[in-house]
Structures are given as structure tokens and as C-alpha cells.
Amino acid sequence: MIGAAKQAATATREDNNEIDTIGQIFCWIAPVCGSRYTNRHAPFCHGAPQHADCIGAGGNGQLPTAEGDPPAGCYCRCRPNRPEWRRYFGGISRSPSTTGSSAGCESYSVPALLPLLTLYWMVFKPVSWPHLLMSCDLLAKKEFDVNKILTLPLLMLLLPLPALAAQLQSVAARVATQQETLTGFTREAALLVVSTEVAGRVERVTADVGDRLEKGTSFACLDTTFIDLEIRANQAEQQRLQVDITHYSKQVKRFSRLLQQKSSSQSQLDESERALQSSRAQLVASQVQAQILRERRQRHCVAGPAGWRVIERHVEPGQWLNIGTPVVTLGDYSRLIVPFALNNAEFTVLERQAGDLKLRLPDRGGEVTAQIEHVSPAFDPVSRKIQVELAIEQPMQQPRGGIRAELRLELPASSGTVLLPRAALSERYEQHWLTRADGEQLKVVYLGVASGVEGEWVRVAAPGLKAGDRFQLPAE
């Protein structure tokens, strides 16, 4: 033994490197095979007697054949006869086999560590090579007792947890949506029917259907002959009262001087003062009446809000109108409204998209921004819909009613369809499968590629499949 150690110590560096490499390869292969003897072990066992002694045993104590094939139930380990090999597997604990030995080949039981290492390598083989090398180094330092044999695989199972988490990625199924297009038509933001407040005959009409009313202009005017006469009569009455006030003012001054001279009575002075105050009150009433007449004269011309457009004209020149007769229908087209009738699901989606609403105008070939203008609190029990009005924000050229507008809403699919990455889907025998996070296989129906989703996602459906379920993704 001492001579063999000295001979190994004097070996060249290249030979040592070669032996180290061979030892590492053996440590990698042994867990893979579960320490069961195979042909690939032959160079390290009886096929390479210069490096190792073959020590094997089977259920009947037979040795391996000349070709290297083990008999049934045979397990084999190589006992190194060189110090460099003991660095990797010279310290494995062993015990004599109960089956005995034959042909001078010593029998050993299979170490308890090797099956555990084999299981570890089969489960975590993409990340286990460094850990297996570490185990070989630990095996070379000292012989293992039972505690170490059981503890090492447990430690090795904990080491690759981050890599295992990266390898076993999962993804949650998303709710599949279907695009629903609702069609509405534009209308005016407000509608106004203007009626006459006075009776009379229509004298002139200044606008027609489609015209825009400008500020300070009127749509139609009635005959003002009689109101003008009333205004002239009022003016004459005011002049008469002015004369009376001047006269009674002089009378009051005259009777005041005479009363001081005791040439007149107090009653005469009081009568003049009373007449003066009465004339002044009548003048104020006449002035108020003049304001009423002027206002009534203005009401002989029917006007509307500036900027509104004539929708319908109800009168013609020469036509007699009574008080309250409709004259014209006006509309505010400075903003356009698009009404929709939505169910609860559609209204919920609309509220979520309230900050980024778009309306497509097929007739105009473009899109416009919109916002929710009005939501009716009432519910129609017949249609089971909610009345919602959307207002187009940006100005349009030639605004009018009846422009077709399309509202597109992404609604959850009613069929229970979900979205998953294509990588999570596997195909076998023209059938598609998913693997749940717990490893359960689920057969699904492939419905095609999902549109409008970033990445490569597909639509699938299956009984019991719902959004939020997690499925495995293959490691990249």
C-alpha cells in the first residue's frame, strides 16, 4: 500500500490530470446508473485492471462475464488500487455481501448514498452537475456515516431550488375577450323649439332650414304696426304729465307765498300739492308702460341661440300666429351626441374605458375621441338596457346628425374561453393538452390564435377551465 502511494506521488502532472478526469466521469456515471453494473463501467472495473480491481456480486455470487455484462441482479463497485482514484470514490462505506465471494473477487453491498444520488440526478439533472462534483469531493475526504449519507442528498435537494423555480415556470390563464361592435348615429347636442310670445301676422322670415343663426339676427318678425301706435300714445301721455307736473309745481310755490302773506287758505296749497304728486306718479306709471311696450315690440321678432342651426321651419310670411305657436326648431351642432342602449356587462366595460373612448366613423373614414355625457338612471324593463349618451369631443367638419358611429367593446367571452401562451400548449396525436401547476394533464379545445394581445397567445376552452388557473410553462 505504501509503495503504491509513493508510486502515485511520483506520477506526472499530465497522468494525474487524466486520472482526475476519469474519476470525475465515473462519479457522474455512477449515480445515473444507480450503481448497477453496465458495460460503460467496464473500463473502470475488470476491463482496466491496471487502475482498479473489479469486485462484484450477484444474487448467486457470480462474476461478470468476459464481455462485461453482469449476471441477473449483479451490482458492482470498483475498488481503486491507485491513490488518485480514492480521491473520488475510495472512501465509500461498504460491507461484505451475505452471498459470499468467488474467484477471489471481494463482494460489497450497494452504498445507500448511490440510489439517493441517482434520484437526485434524475429529477434535477439540468442543474445537478456541480452538486455531484461537490459530493465526490466530500466522499474523498472521509468515510460517511449514516447521518452524512442521509443528510447530503437532503442538502443537495435544497441547493437547486432557485434554479428549479426558474425551470418550473407557470402562467395564469387570462379571460378571453370577444370584440362587440355597437352602432349609433350622431344627433345634435340640444334641440329647441321656439314659439311666439305675441299674436300677429308674420311679416318676414330671415333664415331657412340648415342655416346657422348669427348673433344679433332674428329668424322671423311679426307686424309691429299696432305696437308702434301704442308706443306713440304712451309717449304723448308722458308729455302731458310733464306739463301737469310743471303747472302744479308753480301752483304750489304761488300758494305758499300767498299763505305766508295770509292772502290764501291752507286748503288751496294742499290741493295743489296733491295734484303735483299725482301727476308725478302717473308719469312713472307711463314710463313703466313704455318699457313694457318696447319689450313687447322686441318679442315680435323670434330669435334663437347664436350658432344654432335651423332644423325645421314652421311659418311662412303673412301667416297669422297666436301666442305659443311654434315658429322654428333649432339644434346645437357644435357638439355631437351618439346615444347607445347598453346592457349591464357592456356598461361595466364602458365605464372601465371611460378615459380612452374611441368612436369609429365608417362614413368619414376615421376615429374620434369621446366621453360619457349622460347616463340615464332609469331602466327599460322591456329591452333591459341602460340609455347612455357619448359626446364627441373634437370638432368636426360639416357636423350633422345621422353620421354612423361604431363603439367597440372588449367583452368577456361567454363560452368560457381563456387565453394562454402558445408555449404552455402541447399537441399529441392531434389533441391539445395543458399541464396544471400540480402536474395534472388537461385536454383542451384549441380555438386559434388570440388577436390584439401582445405576444403569442392562443384561445382554448375545456370543461372546468377558468381564468386564473395556473399551468406549467417549459423552461426557456
Image: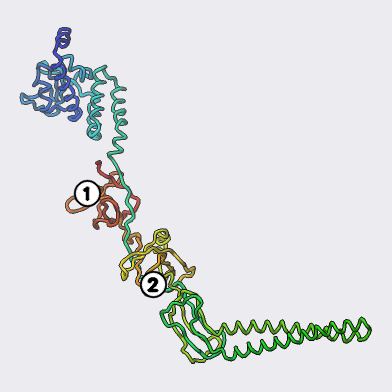
Taking depth in this image into account, of 454 and 324 the one nearest to the observer is: 324
Quadrant location of the C terminus in the rendered image: top left
Disc 1 secondary structure class = strand
Quadrant location of the N terminus in the rendered image: top left
| Residue 162, position as x, y percentages in the image | 31, 35
Q: Are marks 2 and 1 in contact (CB under 8 Å)?
A: no
The residue that disc 2 covers is 399
Q: Quadrant of residue 210?
A: bottom left
| Residue 120, position as x, y percentages in the image | 25, 31
| Residue at the image point whose x is 34% and y is 71% from the top | 404
| Residue 391, position as x, y percentages in the image | 43, 67
Disc 2 secondary structure class = loop
Query: Which sits earlier in the primary sequence, circle 2 or circle 1?
Result: 2
The residue that disc 1 covers is 426
- In the depicted structure, whether residue 75 falls above or below residue 470: above
Q: Looking at the image, is mark 2 or mark 1 nearer the viewer?
A: 2
The number of numbered badges drawn on the structure is 2
Q: Quadrant of residue 52?
A: top left
